[in-house]
Amino acid sequence: MDYRKFLYEQKKKQKEMKAKAAKVILKEIRLGPNIDDHDFNFKLKHATKFLQDGAKVKVEVFFKGRSIVYKDKGEYVLLKFAQELEEFGKVERMPKLEGKRMIMILTPKK
């Protein structure tokens, strides 16, 4: 057997496997700590669609200026968001404060 042919076949198989592998898509949704009900529901619809399509959703509450004082409001918003999406996805990473942003990651249910 020719060594170059063997390498070619191996490379071809790896390329095929890579093409068949599921690619993880991460969608991002930004909220504020003082978000209104209508805006919250609007973002919720988008997140529902993303989760139904099989993408992960990164939900982020961005604190501007002095609003960083209300960290508990941001966490409340994220937990409420997770509770609303309970039937479509589950929480992969609980809300965590990183600088001026509080981040939570949701994954779709199988």
Image: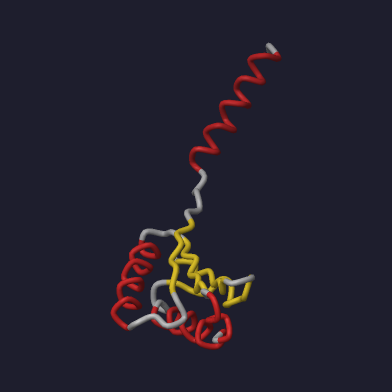
Residue situated in front as seen by the camera: 17 or 23:
23
Q: Is residue 64 above or below residue 27?
A: below
Report x, y in % for residue 21: 52, 45
Q: Residue at x 50, y 70 (%)?
A: 60
Q: Residue at x 31, y 71 (%)?
A: 45
Q: Is residue 59 above or below residue 71?
A: above
Q: Is residue 2 above or below residue 13?
A: above
Report x, y in % for residue 50: 38, 62
Identify the coloring.
Answer: secondary structure
Report x, y in % for residue 55: 44, 59
Q: Residue at x 63, y 26 (%)?
A: 10
Task: Give the residue furthest to the top.
Answer: 2
| Viewport quadrant of the C terminus | bottom left
Residue situated in front as seen by the camera: 72 or 89:
72
Report x, y in % for residue 106: 49, 69
In this rendering, the count of numbered labels is 0
Task: Give the residue furthest to the front.
Answer: 65
In this picture, residue 42 sits left or right of residue 1: left
Tell me where residue 83 sits by quadrant.
bottom left
Residue situated in front as seen by the camera: 6 or 85:
85
Tell me where residue 104 sits by quadrant.
bottom right
Tell me where residue 14 sits by quadrant.
top right
Task: Give the residue furthest to the right.
Answer: 3
Q: Residue at x 35, y 73 (%)?
A: 44
| Viewport quadrant of the N terminus | top right
